[in-house]
Image: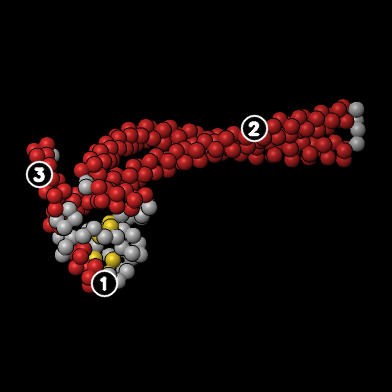
Amino acid sequence: MGDNAPQYDYVKRLHFIFWPKGFELSAEWFFKLKEFDSLGKMKASHLKVIKEQEGRLSKLSDKRQEQISEASTLKSELLSVQQSYFETEKKMNTCEEQASRLHSIGGDQAKIEAFKQEAADLENKLFEYIERTEVIQASLEDNKTFLAGLENTLKEIELEVNQEVQENQTGISQAELRMKLIKEELPPNFKATLESTLKKNLAVGSFTRIDNGSCFFCRYKISRTDESEIDMQQLLKLCPQCSRIFLPYGS
Ligand SMILES: [Zn+2]
């Protein structure tokens, strides 16, 4: 760019002398607008990559959160099963004590049998609680292993993502700097038009072209006169409908 600087000055001076009739010279400024447009698109694609990369991380973080909350559900179920186990064991012991107390005083045989039956039923319940405890503990173990693997993956991906994000942010800064310089190089009417169009924050960019007699973006029909002024005379014009700046054919 430095090598071109004197030439730009020359072009600028000529432009100034002939303005506004020197439309041939406006080709230079449209060339810059086109570069500005490309830089804007480049910036958008860098932003897209950054968003995708950050999406990778947030997906993994969501998965980790899922695992953590699953573990906490399992742990609270385990506590409640253990609580039930102790309560049932206590009831079972009481039944056995009652049975042997009745037995020792020569009590009613039917009552003794009833206590023994209840104790046996409670013991079966205890086996169920033990089985459930083993299942929960195995699930917790799986969860722990999976979570540890996930943490390692997260660390690796985080490194990759950070690097990608940093590279793309550098790309964005470079594009922004070049865009700022281009704005400063433009003659006042180009600069003012560009700035007011940028303020509108139009989707997919601030520029358009004539495509088969219509605005490429919004398909607004362009008159023959306007088409000739834009494409042949290279005058700076906006689309009356979507207000994007027309880049002339060939620029
Ligand atoms: Zn349009």
In the displayed structure image, the side of residue 112 where residue 139 appears, left or right: left
Figure quadrant of residue 209: bottom left
Whether residue 249 is visible, yes or no, is no
Q: Which residue is mark 1?
A: 223
The N terminus: image quadrant: top left
Secondary structure beneath dot 2 equals: helix
Measure the C-alpha gap from mark 1 to mark 2: 79 Å
Q: Which residue is mark 2?
A: 79
Q: How many marks?
A: 3
Point out the tag, 1 or 2, that comes first from the N-terminus.
2
Residue beneath the point at 54% across and 39% down: 70
Residue 91, percent across and down?
A: 78, 32
Point out the tag, 3 or 1, that comes first from the N-terminus.
3
Secondary structure beneath dot 1 equals: loop
Q: Which amino acid type is marked by label 2? A: Leu
Q: Which residue is mark 3?
A: 10
Q: In the image shown, does 149 or 83 lie closer to the viewer?
A: 149
Task: Classify 10 Å Cα crowding around label 2: few (below 14), some (14-19), many (20 and above).
Answer: few
Residue beneath the point at 28% across and 57% down: 245
Marker disc for residue 23: none
Question: Viewer-nearest of labels 1 and 2?
Answer: 1
Question: Viewer-nearest of labels 3 and 2?
Answer: 3
Whether residue 51 is visible, yes or no, is yes
